[in-house]
Amino acid sequence: MNGPLAIGAAGDFALLNPASNLRKIDRAGAQDAVATTRVRAMICGLLLVVMSLYPPGAIAQNLPNFAPDAYCQRMAGIGGFSRETYGGCLGLERRALDALRSNWTSVPSSIRVRCTRMATIGENGSYSTLQGCIDMELAAPAAPAQAAQPRRFFLMRPPDQNGTAYDSLDDCLAARTKIAPEVAICIYR
């Protein structure tokens, strides 16, 4: 039962209803309303406790869970299904996922959020699109206030935390394609 309760002089209860103002209910109905309110309050309290356990932006810290198989089936099906396209797409998605797993937390959260939105346009998300977006975002010119700081591209491969420095994104991406079977991502810092 929804709405505030009023207690009558005889000990009966009335539910305040905007449509009819008052409606009499028995004690059991009032007790149900009170119990329901208590349960709702406990659930809200529990949710607040659980949410407080996660730091701000924790959701953006988790790598999205895409379905590469469904994505690649859709891509390979454009213009008639191609097994070669499907297999190549799966390989590309797996390599991108591996690279993203190893470097996800080093990518600024604003870029992770923006690129995740972009990578999920359409029915299924794509790890290779997500990785490409992150590469481009990190390669974007720095704001004028930061232009004085020299920044470079780093080819990051696990377990190396420092990476190999390159002067341009093209150089970094070219080096990444040369080590194609290995997991790697280009990061701009």
Image: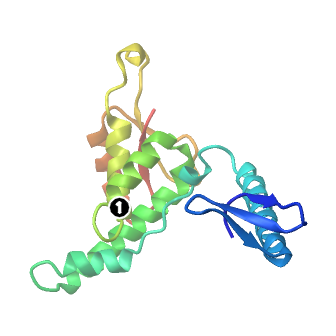
Residue 158 vs residue 14, the one in the foreground? 14
- Horizontal side, residue 185 vs residue 19: left or right: left
> What colour scheme does the image use?
rainbow
> Is residue 118 visible from the viewing direction of this image?
yes
Quarter assignment of residue 121: bottom left
**Element carrying mark 1:** loop
Compared with 109, 49 (above or below) is: below
* Count of marks overlaid on the render: 1
- Horizontal side, residue 50 vs residue 156: left or right: right
Badge 1, how many Cα within 10 Å: few under 14, some, many 20+?
A: some
> Looking at the picture, how far across and down is residue 176, in whole percent?
35, 53
- Horizontal side, residue 47 vs residue 89: left or right: right
Quarter assignment of residue 151: top left
Residue 154 vs residue 105, the one in the foreground? 105
> Looking at the picture, how far across and down is residue 88, in whole percent?
27, 75
Q: Which residue corresponds to the image point at 79% horizontal and 58% vertical from the top-left?
A: 6
> Looking at the picture, how far across and down is residue 70, in whole percent?
34, 79
Q: Which residue corresponds to the image point at 85% horizontal and 68% vertical from the top-left?
A: 12
Amino acid on which the number 1 mark rests in the picture: Thr
Compared with 71, 5 (above or below) is: above
Residue 156 vs residue 120, the one in the foreground? 120
Residue 152 vs residue 18, the one in the foreground? 18
Q: Residue furthest left?
A: 79
The residue that mark 1 highlights is 120
Q: Residue furthest front?
A: 10
Q: Which residue corresponds to the image point at 53% horizontal and 51% vertical from the top-left?
A: 60
- Horizontal side, residue 9 vs residue 64: left or right: right
Q: Which residue corresponds to the image point at 30% horizontal and 71% vertical from the top-left?
A: 123
- Looking at the figure, which quarter contains the N terminus? bottom right
> Is residue 178 visible from the viewing direction of this image?
no
Compared with 67, 117 (above or below) is: above
